[in-house]
Image: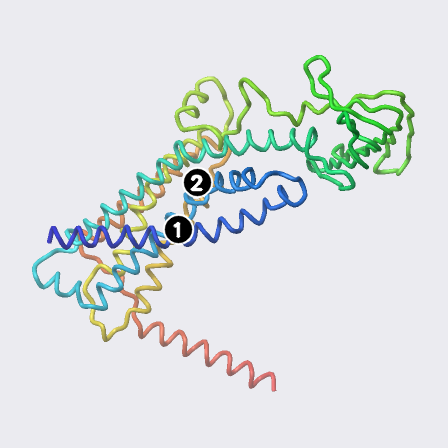
Amino acid sequence: MRRFGTYLFSRTLSAFLGVMLTLAGIAWVTQALRRFDLVTAKGQAIAVYLGLTMLSMPRVLGVVAPFALVVALVLVLQRLQAESGTVAITAAGVSQRRLALPFIAAALTVSVFIAALAFWLNPGASRSVYDMMQTVRADIVANVIQPGRFTQVDTGLTFHIRNRDGDGSLLDLFILDDRNPEFSYTYSAKRGRVAEVAGRSMIVMEQGTIERKTKDSGANTFVTFGSYAFDLSQFAAKSGNTNYGLSERTLGELFSLRKTDDDPEIAPEIMNRLAEPIYPLAQTLAVFLFLGFPTSNRRGQTLPVTMAIIVGSLVRVLGFAVMGVSKGSPEISFMAVAAPTLLTVVFAIMIIVGVHPVVSTGFLDNLIDRLRRAIIGRQEAAR
C-alpha cells in the first residue's frame, strides 16, 4: 500500500500542476492584454511589460490553486473508480481513512505552497508592481511622451507635445488635468522642460495659458503666464519608507503593524492570510467523500463527479464570502479561520465514521422529469 500511496500522491500533484499551469496561463494572457497599453500607449519597453505581467502571477496562482486541486483530485479518484481500483483496495482490507492519506499529503503540500504565496510571495510581488508602476509613471512624463501622441499618465491626466527640441525641451506642450471633481485644468505652453526645483521634479512651462473650467456650471477662467511649474513629484518613484497597502505587506509585517496601528482592516487581513492554507485540506476531504468510497460502475460516475466538483469548489467560494463579510470588522474576523477549520473537522469525521453522501440517481431522474413536464405544460398553455 505504501508504493501505491506514493503513486496516488505523485499522480495527484502531477495533475494539480498541469491544471494549475493551464488555468494560470489563461489568467496570464488576460493580465497581459490588460497591461498592453504600457507598450502601445505609454511606450514602455517589452521587458517592463513582461515584468509587470509576471509579477501578477503569485496572486493569480493563489486564486486558481485551490480549484486546480479539486479538478486534479476528481481526475485521479474518478479514474480509480472507473478501473474498480477503490473496490479492489477496499476488498483487500484497506480502510477509507488509510486510502485518504496520500490525498491528504498532497493537500498539505499544496497548503504549504499557498501559505508561501499568501504570507510572502504575493505581498512581495504586489510591492514590486507598485514600485515599478511608480517608476513607469515618472519615466512616461520625463522620457516617454511621444511627439504628436496623447499620453495618459494617470486617470484624468493627459500629456501631448508637438516635438522635442535638440536640448530636450518640449515644444507646444499641452496638459489636461481632469482629476479634480470640481474643476478641470488645461495647460498649454510654447515650450517646457523637465527640471529639479528644490528637490522636486517639475515641468517648467514658458509662454502659455491656464484654463480652469467649472464642471457644474461650465464657467471658464483664463490665466496667461510667462513661466509656470507643473509638479511631477507625485509620479516619481518614492525613496525611503513607502506607505504600502495591507495587501503589499508580509504576514510578519502585518503582525508588527497591528501593534502600532488601530486600522480595523488589519485583523481581517491577517485572519484571511492564515485561513488560505486550510482550504486545500477541506476541499480534498470534500472531494474524497464523494469519490473515495467504493461504488458500482453500473450506477455511473456523472453525479458523484459533479457533486465533488461543486462541493469542493463551494468550500473555497465560501472563503471568499467570509472574507468579504469580515473585511473591516475585527470582531468577526475569526470566522475566516473558523469556517474552513470547521468544514475540515466535519468532513474528516464523516470519512472516519464512513458516511458516504450518495445522491440518489432516482431523485435526479425524477427532478429532470418534473422539469421537462413543466416546460411542456407551459408550451402547450402558450398555444
Q: Position of residue 267 (x, y in %)?
A: 44, 29
Residue depicted at x 37% and y 76%: 366
- Residue on which disc 1 sits: 21
Relative horizontal placement of residue 170, taking residue 10 as reference (left or right): right
Quick one: SS at disc 1? helix
Q: Quadrant of residue 82?
A: bottom left
Q: Position of residue 79 (x, y in %)?
A: 25, 64
Q: Amino acid at mark 1?
A: Leu
- Residue on which disc 2 sits: 58
Q: Position of residue 195 (x, y in %)?
A: 73, 20
Q: Say if 252 sits above or below 177 in the image.
A: above
Residue depicted at x 78% and y 27%: 169
The C terminus, quarter of image: bottom right
Q: Earlier in the sequence, mark 2 or mark 1?
A: 1
Q: Residue furthest front?
A: 166
Mark 1: few, some, or many residues within 10 Å (few <14, many ≥20)? some
Relative horizontal placement of residue 131, taking residue 176 as reference (left or right): left
Q: What sort of colour scheme is used for the picture?
A: rainbow
Relative horizontal placement of residue 296, taking residue 28 as reference (left or right): left
Q: Residue furthest left?
A: 92
Q: Quadrant of residue 254?
A: top left
The N terminus, quarter of image: bottom left
Q: CA distance from mark 2 to mark 1?
A: 12 Å
Between 161 and 266, the residue placed more toward the observer is 161
Between 262 and 177, the residue placed more toward the observer is 177
Q: Amino acid at mark 2?
A: Pro
